[in-house]
Amino acid sequence: MTKIVNSTAGAEVRANVESVASSAFLIRLYYLASYASIGVFLPFISPWLVAQGISGFGLSAVTCSRPIAGIVAPLIFGWLADRFRWRGSLLRFAGVMSLLPFVALTLFHFMGIAVGFSGVFVAVAAFSFFRIPMMTIADVAAMEKNQSFGGLRLWGSLGFICAALPVGLWISDWRSVVFPLAISVSLLAAVLVSWRLPARAAPANVVSSSKFRELLTRRDLRFMFGIWALWAVSHVAYDLCFSLRLRDLGAKPIDVSVAWSMGTLAEVALMAISGTLLPRASHATWTFVGLLGTALRWLLMAKAQSLTLLLILQPLHAISFALLWMTWLDFVKQNTPAHFLGRAQAALSTVVSVGSAVGILLWGPLYASRGAAFVFDAAAAIAAAAVVLSLVPLRNSLALRSATNA
């Protein structure tokens, strides 16, 4: 009888391990497919819009729909994710709804129908509203796994590279249909993978929303909100103007792909070691280091006047984005009860989206009137302000460590 019981227990353990491994594999595959769409969108959206005759404030208005959608969508989907423990079902719905706008843009292009500013604005806004929850819900599902989050999330960065490089080769001119078509294909792949993910997470106790509001009033979290917002204002200058700066210096589409891919490769490398790197210092320390690196990166990019120098600077993306994003996601995970994880991740995404919206509305007109060098100088100044703000939690962290060691 004991042997039978032990055999049954062993089979259950093996089945559970296999289920976890299968789920982790699917999350990696989902990251790979879903971030491929961002590997097309971020490098090519600005040159594509300018080629459509949309520049200046129009460029800001269209691209700003993405962070504005990010202010509302994560809160709605984060609440649904926590309240009903939905995971795969939300990813499927969001994936289909983000796919449809770019399918429409692709079909209109083949039919020779000009959509104009209004059509492009609606399509990008709809894509953005549903694309952002695809990232936040996937991050929540990944953080719930008993594995290194960086080891899972880096597959999204690999998907970015796998899309950016071939699309740069396929685009013959900046107006090419390859842009909306490639986004449609990658989103379709993400939707297909999402159908294999579990619809719900494991049951959890439902806790009053007032408890979550109490969590948001913590002084350290309020400081982090300010830091996240300032960082986003500065970092969105890269998303909006980096490809335009490359283009202004004579870069071809493949050059843009290579430049973005070099930065993303550095991002992958840091995410791969984030599980062992982050515990070596406090969240406040890594935040200070990352923001200092961010300010330095934008300052150097403002002064660089050649494609070669801009390429040399690209590995700094590991510091200005990957280090900070991994640090802040770990901060959210370590400081949030499991039943609030979806909403806490949504709060991070919302604050970043607010900062990004402000930045896009600022950088688009500034690029049109003053050029990319001025934009990155200003972004460096804003990142420097975030560095100063980060000194408060850094001082508190050092004081706490000193008291602990005493």
Image: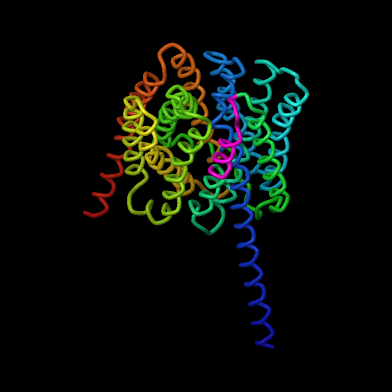
Majority secondary structure in the magenta region? helix
Q: Residue at x 69, y 52 (%)?
A: 197
Q: Is residue 57 left or right of residue 218?
A: right
Nearer to the camera, 28 or 357: 28
Q: Is residue 253 left or right of residue 9?
A: left
Q: Residue at x 56, y 56 (%)?
A: 145
- Is there any visible trace of residue 55 in the rendered image? yes
Residue 79 point in image, percent of width and height? 63, 38
Q: Quadrant of the C terminus?
A: bottom left
Q: Is residue 163 magenta?
A: yes
- Residue at the outermost top position: 369
Q: Quadrant of residue 101?
A: top right
Q: Is residue 340 above or below residue 183?
A: below
Q: Quadrant of the N terminus?
A: bottom right
Number of on-image labels: 0
Q: Residue at x 46, y 17 (%)?
A: 362
Nearer to the camera, 264 or 63: 264
Q: Is residue 6 left or right of residue 306?
A: right
Q: Is residue 239 left or right of residue 93?
A: left
Q: Is residue 142 magenta?
A: no
How is the protein colored in the picture? rainbow
Residue 22 point in image, percent of width and height? 64, 61
Q: Quadrant of residue 313?
A: top left
Q: Which residues are magenta?
A: 161-174
- Residue at the outermost left position: 406
Residue 196 point in image, percent of width and height? 71, 53
